[in-house]
């Protein structure tokens, strides 16, 4: 899987406003990413970007080599959907709320995982589905 220019695109969300990701985890993930030669884009908060319908979300959503380090995949998919820029099934979302920084580093070192294995409830990735 590769982006429009033949490279993977990696987006790191700092979850600056929500305060839901453990500070030690997001700090270590950001440090680890900065210590590599890997290109990545750090955004302050995908929730805020979604609320503003930031055009950068559409650019991310169009990229076929997208990996996002943020929170729950289901939530990230909903944020993009709410902004009018749904993510494709090939996007991998790594969850800093549930994984350790070491686990994220290990996953990023390997090939992207299929979206269906990101969460145990794969139907939760469908923003069209409603929950009672």
Image (cartoon, rainbow, N blue to C red):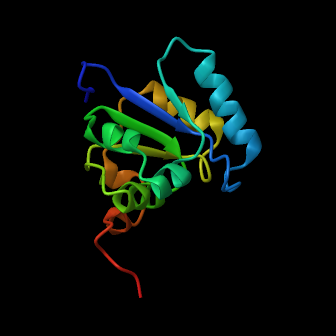
Please tell me whether residue 71 is drawn above or below residue 5 in the rendered image: below
Where residue 107 appears, x then y in whole percent? 48, 34
Q: Is residue 28 above or below residue 86?
A: above
Residue 118 sits above or below residue 32 on the image: below
Based on the displayed image, in which of its 4 quarters is residue 101 positioned? top right
Query: In percent of the image, x 72 and y 49: which residue is there?
Result: 22
Q: Quadrant of residue 80?
A: bottom left
Location of the C terminus by quadrant is bottom left
Identity of the residue drawn at 48% across and 24% down: 40
Towards the viewer: 83 or 120: 83
| Residue 11 x %, y % | 47, 34
Q: Residue furthest top?
A: 37
Drawn side of residue 120 relative to residue 48, left or right: left
Q: Is residue 11 left or right of residue 89?
A: right
- Residue furthest to the right in view is 24
Q: Quadrant of the N terminus?
A: top left
Residue at the (75%, 44%) spot, across then down: 23
> How many discs mark residues in the rendered view?
0
């Amino acid at each position: 899987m590769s982006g429009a220019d033949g490279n993977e695109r990696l987006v790191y969300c700092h979850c600056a406003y929500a305060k839901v990701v453990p500070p030690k985890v997001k700090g270590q993930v950001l440090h680890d990413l900065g210590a590599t030669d890997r290109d990545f884009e750090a955004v302050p908060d995908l929730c805020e970007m979604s609320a503003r319908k930031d055009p950068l979300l559409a650019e991310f959503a169009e990229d076929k080599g997208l990996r996002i380090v943020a929170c729950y995949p289901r939530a990230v998919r909903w944020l993009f959907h709410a902004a009018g820029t749904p993510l494709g099934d090939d996007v991998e979302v790594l969850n800093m709320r549930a994984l350790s920084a070491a686990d994220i580093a290990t996953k990023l070192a390997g090939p992207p995982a299929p979206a269906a294995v990101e969460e145990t409830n794969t139907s939760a990735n469908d923003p069209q589905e409603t929950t009672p």
